[in-house]
Amino acid sequence: MTKQELLSYCAETYGTTPDHPFEDDFVTTVLRHRDTKKWYGIIMELSRSKLGLDSGEAVDVINLKLPLEMYGSFGKEEGVYPAYHMNKLHWISVILQDASEETLRFLVNVSYESTKRKNKLRQEV
């Protein structure tokens, strides 16, 4: 999947407008919830070597939040790695061109759900 295809998917599915929060950096793209503005993904251009691979090739990578209990299931999936530059217990990095489209969409959906506002029930005393 290309970066543009992923951005289109997020726009169609969640109404996400890409955000470029870093001054003079229009490559790095943040995906945010419309209501809370919390990140559910950040797309960056990285060298494969930043993910521990033996290549300097630049690729598009998305960091996504994943519940801890799911990491074992996806940590060995093609194109999925411990997060670059984020908490490795809660975030993963996915190389867009290496992961299957099905896996990538599923992980984006999980990240979106993991980062959305939690409705807290208040109990009356």
Image (cartoon, rainbow, N blue to C red):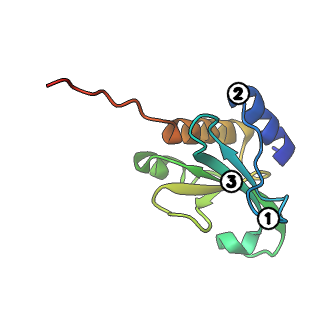
Residue type pointed to by label 2: Thr
Q: Nearer the viewer, mark 3 or mark 1?
A: 1
| Label 3 sits on residue | 42
Marks 3 and 1, the one that precedes in the sequence? 1
In the drawing, does residue 80 fall left or right of residue 5? left
| Label 1 sits on residue | 23
What distance separates the C-alpha of mark 3 from that of mark 1? 15 Å
Q: Nearer the viewer, mark 1 or mark 2?
A: 1
Q: Is residue 35 above or below residue 19?
A: above
**Residue shown at the point (69%, 35%) measured from the top left:** 102
Marks 1 and 2, the one that precedes in the sequence? 2
Give the x, y percent position of residue 23: 79, 65
What distance separates the C-alpha of mark 1 from that of mark 2? 27 Å
**Residue shown at the point (61%, 43%) measured from the top left:** 37
Quadrant of the rendered image containing residue 91: bottom right
Is any part of residue 55 visible from this angle? yes
